[in-house]
Image (tube, helix red, strand yellow):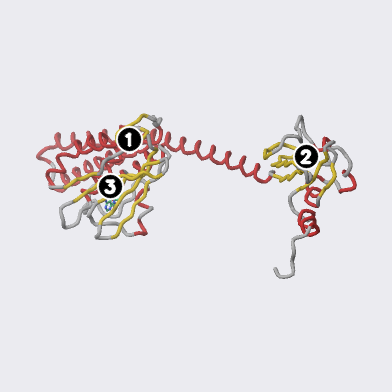
């Protein structure tokens, strides 16, 4: 910048060529200065307006005496009303007396349009989500009846025909029953998943420690059978749905026990305050997850293993994500294969 000195001429030239509309008023509300940005925005050239009262540009009862930053609408030369962000500042002379005011005006039409279309899109998304949940609910419900019928008739055939059935036929009938059982399991999970999204989220103050104790009580048999070690930090109070939080703990701890490696599962539940939220986590020493699957495992019915390797339907983490997101939180995993996984989730602090 050698050779450039900040002079009044320089400042005037910067203001004149500025993209934002800038003008100055005297104490009489008459326009004394009008830049190129103002010409572009309002359609008036400087000679149209200099000396005129500013009221020409104002919509409704906007007072140019009002200083500071605010949003309003103003009128262009063609009479069109446009949304603008306005900053009025007082201009003082050398002795500190107010001799007028300057205005910096920015066109916010594009931003307003964006806001409206964003709001529209999110309402649309909400509606289609609700519709999808409703749809899943109805399907899951209606599927149960034919499944019961299938199982019932397979049973009847086996009982009625009894000894007369060939061994091969009995095996086939068993397959039908197994298939129907599996289908019932999936349908029940689909219902749970649909329900997890439609419930209202209360904002009760809940103790994470109590929710954890309840979840551990439900898992008691599996914990003692596997010799699982579960420890936890001091856990906070959060705001939300107690049953939902229990379900999250139960799913995450259940997984931490199920996907264990050669060692006995060692599980730790931790918590850390992060601004208005608490971040909680469930850490295990299990088989871990490759980083490319870290997102996908939260999708409904997404699994990385066959049922022969590990039982389950793949809905648990999808339900956890729904519950956490209903609370305005996030859930994610950090993991390394064979080193264990840590599932983190955030909830609003109480
Ligand atoms: P499910 O347990 O019925 O398979 P989830 O939705 O709970 O369904 O989990 C989805 C998949 O994520 C699991 O099949 C597994 O591959 C992986 N996963 C979840 N938790 C863990 C964990 N603690 N350690 C390793 N893999 C896990």
Question: What is the quadrant of the C terminus in the image?
Answer: top left
Mark 1 or mark 3: whose residue is earlier in sequence: 1
Q: Which mark is residue 98?
A: 2
Instruction: Identify residue for label 3.
Output: 282
Q: Which mark is residue 237?
A: 1
Identify the residue shown where x is 27% and y is 60%. Answer: 337
How far separated are the C-alphas under marks 1 and 2?
A: 54 Å
Q: Is residue 54 above or below residue 312?
A: above
> Label 3 crowding class (10 Å Cα cut-off): few <14, some 14-19, many 20+?
many
Identify the residue shown where x is 76% and y is 29%. Answer: 61
In-front residue for pair 264/122: 264
Left or right side of 179 for 128: right
In-front residue for pair 183/250: 250
**Residue 153 occupies which quadrant of the picture?**
top left
Q: Position of residue 200 (x, y in %)?
A: 40, 30
Asked whether mark 3 and ligand 1 are closer than 8 Å, the reply comes as yes
In-front residue for pair 234/328: 234
Mark 3 or mark 2: whose residue is earlier in sequence: 2
Badge nearest the viewer, 3 or 2: 2
Asked whether mark 2 and ligand 1 are closer than 8 Å, the reply comes as no
Q: Position of residue 227 (x, y in %)?
A: 12, 47
Badge nearest the viewer, 1 or 2: 2
Q: Position of residue 113 (x, y in %)?
A: 65, 43
> Label 1 crowding class (10 Å Cα cut-off): few <14, some 14-19, many 20+?
some
How far separated are the C-alphas under marks 1 and 3?
A: 17 Å
Residue occupying the far left of the picture = 163
Total tally of numbered discs in the picture: 3
How far separated are the C-alphas under marks 3 and 2?
A: 63 Å
Left or right side of 285 for 162: left
């Amino acid at each position: 910048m050698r050779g450039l000195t900040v002079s009044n001429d320089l400042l005037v030239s910067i203001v004149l060529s500025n993209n934002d509309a800038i003008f100055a008023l005297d104490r009489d509300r008459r326009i004394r200065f009008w830049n190129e940005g103002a010409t572009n925005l309002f359609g008036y050239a400087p000679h149209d307006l200099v000396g005129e009262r500013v009221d020409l540009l104002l919509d409704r009862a906007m007072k140019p005496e009002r200083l500071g930053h605010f949003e309003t609408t103003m009128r262009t030369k063609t009479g069109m009303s446009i949304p603008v962000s306005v900053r009025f500042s007082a201009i003082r002379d050398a002795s500190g007396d107010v001799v007028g005011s300057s205005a910096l005006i920015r066109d916010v039409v594009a931003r307003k349009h964006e806001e409206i279309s964003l709001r529209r899109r999110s309402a649309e998304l909400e509606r289609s989500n609700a519709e999808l949940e409703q749809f899943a609910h109805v399907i899951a419900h209606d599927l149960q009846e034919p499944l019961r019928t299938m199982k019932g008739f397979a049973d009847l055939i086996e009982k009625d025909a009894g000894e007369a059935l060939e061994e091969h036929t009995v095996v086939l009938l068993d397959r039908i029953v197994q298939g129907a059982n599996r289908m019932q399991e999936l349908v029940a999970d689909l219902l749970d998943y649909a329900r997890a999204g439609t419930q209202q989220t209360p904002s009760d103050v809940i103790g994470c420690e109590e929710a954890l104790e309840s979840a551990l009580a439900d898992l008691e048999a599996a914990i003692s059978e596997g010799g699982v070690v579960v420890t936890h930090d001091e856990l906070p109070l959060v705001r939300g749905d107690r049953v939902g939080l229990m379900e999250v703990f139960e799913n995450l701890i259940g997984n931490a026990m199920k996907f264990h490696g050669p060692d006995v599962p060692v599980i730790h539940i931790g918590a850390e305050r992060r601004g208005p939220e608490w971040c909680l986590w469930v850490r295990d020493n299990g088989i871990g997850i490759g980083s490319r699957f870290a997102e996908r495992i939260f999708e409904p019915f997404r699994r990385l293993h066959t049922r022969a390797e590990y039982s389950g339907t793949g809905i648990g983490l999808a339900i956890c994500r729904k519950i956490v997101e209903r609370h305005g939180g996030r859930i994610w995993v950090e993991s390394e294969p064979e080193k264990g996984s840590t599932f983190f989730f955030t909830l609003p602090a109480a």
